[in-house]
Amino acid sequence: MLKILVTGATGNVGCEVIRLLVSHDCHVCAALRNPDKVQQILGSKIHCVWFDFINPDTWASAFEGVNKLFLVRPPALANVRKQIAPALNAAKLAGVEHIVFLSLLGAERNRVVPHAKIERYIEQLGIPVTFLRASFFMQNLNTVHREDIKTRGELFMPAGNGKTSFIDVRDIAAVAVRALVEDGHLGKAYALTGGEALTYYEVADIFTEVLGKPIRYTNPSLLKFIWQMRERGLSLDLILVMTAIYTTARLGLAGGITPDVEQLLGCPPLTMRQYVEDYRKFWL
Ligand SMILES: NC(=O)c1ccc[n+]([C@@H]2O[C@H](COP(=O)([O-])OP(=O)(O)OC[C@H]3O[C@@H](n4cnc5c(N)ncnc54)[C@H](OP(=O)(O)O)[C@@H]3O)[C@@H](O)[C@H]2O)c1
């Protein structure tokens, strides 16, 4: 039976990938730093293995017998050579036959982002791969921005009037599962976006309608955003990453829409309205 190891299993995308994989005829394994955590999130039926990208003691047993790997780069690990590549070497040594890598939309044109370095490294290793290059996740709004929306009724990001082609991670996970269990995805790169590009003013209107309480997009300046994030105690590295992401949107570079999700899943991507309806408990 196909053995599939899922990294980032407690995170946004990995968690959904596991939820979908359990109904397939394969042996699903969640790769975890803390096995108790996944059982709280996903229940006790999930098979877990101890895995940490930066702990070599965990690699050989985690990759043993694994045919396919769903690879998520933890956001905090930015040094690919030191923090990601050694574990990938262990995957190669263990005979992993296919990696489905959660990458970033446009990574092929942006050589400085860690995702581009990981893509190149996997290709150099010669492990067959599928790249899922995803746009900005809707789920950032119920994680990173949850408190602003819930307690202040505010969307606080310096994205100007630029549009973003938000994607729901449930669509990314559905594509990932196809890439993992079906034939025909080796050597492919998919550009995954939602089906609509929205400004944050439009997103605020959707929140207001669905939640039945006013949510405003306050469109702070970059300086105000950086100052506010520092006040909240975020690390400078994280603030810089967030600033880069929202500047891309501000410049009108985050609104491109691709047909890949619909072509792969046979139905249109989930909409922002559907997402807010399904996740409304996060903001009430
Ligand atoms: N957010 C976006 O809009 C967006 C868009 C495109 C691409 N991406 C990319 O998507 C990736 C993040 O995916 P996500 O949002 O699904 O993840 P996430 O929710 O940020 O979760 C990170 C996962 O990595 C695990 N992790 C952290 N450090 C680890 C380590 N040393 N060894 C093993 N596992 C470790 C965490 O496990 P613990 O529970 O143990 O902490 C958690 O499961 C990033 O590479 C990001 O750049 C994000």
Image (cartoon, rainbow, N blue to C red):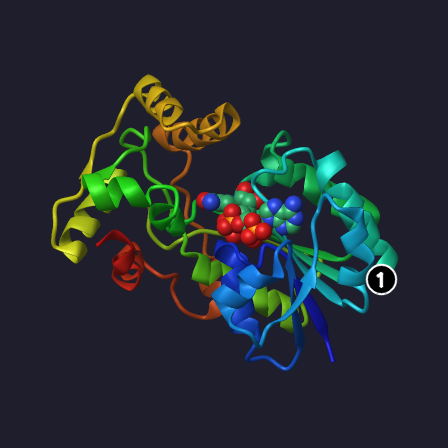
260 to the left or right of 182: left
87 to the left or right of 254: right
Residue 12 position (above or below residue 150) = below
Query: Residue 38: x percent and y percent?
Result: 55, 63
Residue drawn at x 57%, y 77% is 45
Q: Give, as a three-letter code, the residue at label 1.
A: Gly
Residue 78 position (above or below residue 142) = above
Can see residue 123?
no
Q: Secondary structure at mark 1?
A: loop
251 to the left or right of 25: left
The residue at the far right in this view is 93
Residue toward you, 52 or 125: 52
Instruction: Name the quarter where the N terminus is drawn.
Output: bottom right
Report how many numbered discs are placed on residues in the image. 1
The residue at the far top in this view is 223
User: Within the image, what quadrant is residue 119 found in?
Assistant: top right
Query: Residue 107: x percent and y percent?
Result: 59, 39
Residue drawn at x 59%, y 54% is 8
Query: Residue 61: x percent and y percent?
Result: 80, 62
Residue beneath disc 1 = 95
Disc 1: residue Cβ within 8 A of ligand 1's nearest atom:
no
Residue toward you, 51 or 259: 51
Query: Residue 253: x percent and y percent?
Result: 42, 33
The residue at the far front in this view is 36
Residue 3 position (above or below residue 222) = below
Residue drawn at x 69%, y 64% is 49
User: Within the image, what quadrant is residue 220 found in?
Assistant: top left
Residue drawn at x 45%, y 27% is 239
Can see residue 45?
yes
Label 1 Cα crowd, 10 Å radius (few <14 / some 14-19 / many 20+): some
Instruction: Name the quarter where the C terminus is drawn.
Output: bottom left
